[in-house]
Image (cartoon, rainbow, N blue to C red):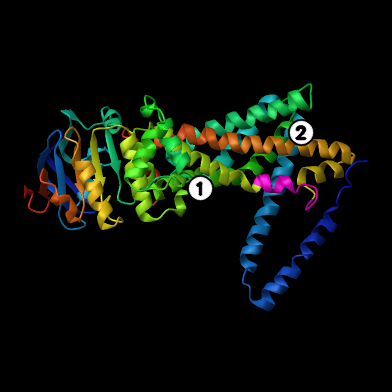
Amino acid sequence: MIDFEDVYLSYNGKVLFNDLSFKVGKGEKVILAGRSGIGKSTLFSLILGFVTPERGMVFFDGEPVDEKNVWQIRRRVAFIDQDVSIGRGRVNEWFDFVLSLKANSSLRRDERGLRESFEYFELEGDILEKDINELSGGERQRIAVVTSIILGRKVFLLDEVTASLDGHMKEKLAWFFCSRSDWTVVVISHDSVWLENPNVKVFDLEGKRWKQ
Amino acid sequence: METIDIKVLPLLFSFLLLTVPIYLSHVFKIGFIRSLLYSVVRMAVQLFLIGIFLKYLFRLNNPYANIAWLVVMILVAVFSAIRNSSLKAGKVLVPAFVSFTIVTLAIVLYLNGVIIRMKNIFDARYLIVLGGMLLGSSLRGNIIGISSFYKNIRKDSKRFLYILSLGATRHEAVLPFLRESVQLAVRPTLASMATMGIVALPGMMTGVIMGGASPEVAIKYQIMIMLAIVTSTISSIVLTILMTTHICFSGYGTLKADIFRK
């Protein structure tokens, strides 16, 4: 599904990836491991075309990530960044904005599905009327998760989505993403809850090899 | 009643006013005497030259010459807008110039033709004076609008990239930032509009009254010019942003780094 081939990338004169190659297959659940600053988030940026490799190629479902394909690729991926940069205004308006995008024109606002997601992730219904700025870190994270789910996509790039959640919610969320066999899920996380799922693979970015 | 002319010697007396700020600067060591004198000299020389220039331009009153001068004023306004932003002139000059020109010309000709109903809509006294007023008054808003748009996308790049990641087109992804920068840019204009006539007598009205017209005529001109200023500010910001996005973003929809000055 996602394929890095001999990717070379440097940042501010420092080599970040030197001939990095690895694959994530369809339906796999992969944790990217490695200390901070090693470029885990940059891997997501490469898949989404926010950063381009100096050498080598990144493929998504067999297609190279280039100026032409990247727009289609973004329509197939649900991404949550580390800072949970969901816009401004009320939560309700945020969902309307997401669904107003042309890429999501096939989706309708499904109040029941939304309520069920809220219930599962233990969000109060009245959060829809709240201003995004007033939400706690954990609430923002869960709103971003709900956003990624309502998009109905099958590939997830999750950057530290469990960081601000309590232990019970971390487990629930990790289980939720790992239990769907048709979802391809790539996770950057320091939380061990992800490792408790038996079908999870771990790629060590420092040693450039599979660990689990 | 015509405007009373000021004789040359009394005009020089107006420079005597400066003794007050110079004295204050000296006593309180505010330290602006040099920059004050620099600005005063520049202002006086520029106005002296423009006075002579406009005198001949008005006398000639050739439509082509009038439009040419308006275009020169637009060019200066665009340069000053870009210089006050963090963008490189070479990258955005052409689209900004095109959008300022379209907006200013369209609005001034609309004022002259449809509202004031002049026989010669290219008449220097109106074309140049109204055009200059429009450019001068919308310049601040334009600078705020255009530079905050690009600054915010750079500063808030995570939010911008996240919107792109949702599958947004480039146009969809810049819209929230466009909205916010236009709101920011027109806020001062809207505020001054809401207090107009109470807090201060606006410039255009003052000019028209001193030119000998009645206050009724003056307020009509003031209403017209205020509406024109708001319209031109908002439309030139929107048009400039839309035209520059073609140049300032890569094929991946990300902001190019080389559009900013170091």
**Residue A208: x percent and y percent?**
8, 49
- In three-dimensional space, the C-alpha distance between marks 2 and 1, rounded to whole angstroms, equals 29 Å
**Residue B211: x percent and y percent?**
86, 41
Image position of B62 (left or right of B166): right
The residue carrying pointer 2 sits among few (fewer than 14), some (14 to 19) or many (20 or more) residues within 10 Å by Cα, namely some
**Residue B249 visible somewhere in the drawing:** no
**Residue A191: x percent and y percent?**
20, 55
Residue lying at the far top of the rendered structure: B119
Q: Is residue B243 above or below residue B117?
A: below
Checking the image for residue B147, the label placed there is none
In what quadrant of the picture does the N terminus of chain B appear?
top right
Image position of B185 (left or right of A161): right
Chain letter behind tag 1? B
Front one among A31 and A59: A31
Q: Is residue B110 above or below residue A114?
A: above
Q: Which residues are magenta?
A: B189-200
Q: Would you name the residue on which mark 1 appears? A: B83
Q: Is residue B68 above or below residue A177?
A: above
Image position of B156 (left or right of B136): left
The amino acid on which the numbered mark 1 sits, given as a three-letter code, is Arg
- Residue occupying image coordinates x 62% and y 66%: B34
Which of the 4 image quadrants contains residue B103? top right
Q: Is residue A10 above or below residue B23?
A: above
Front one among B203 and B175: B175
Q: Would you name the residue on which mark 2 appears? A: B125
The amino acid on which the numbered mark 2 sits, given as a three-letter code, is Arg
**Residue A56: x percent and y percent?**
14, 38
Which of the 4 image quadrants contains residue A168? bottom left
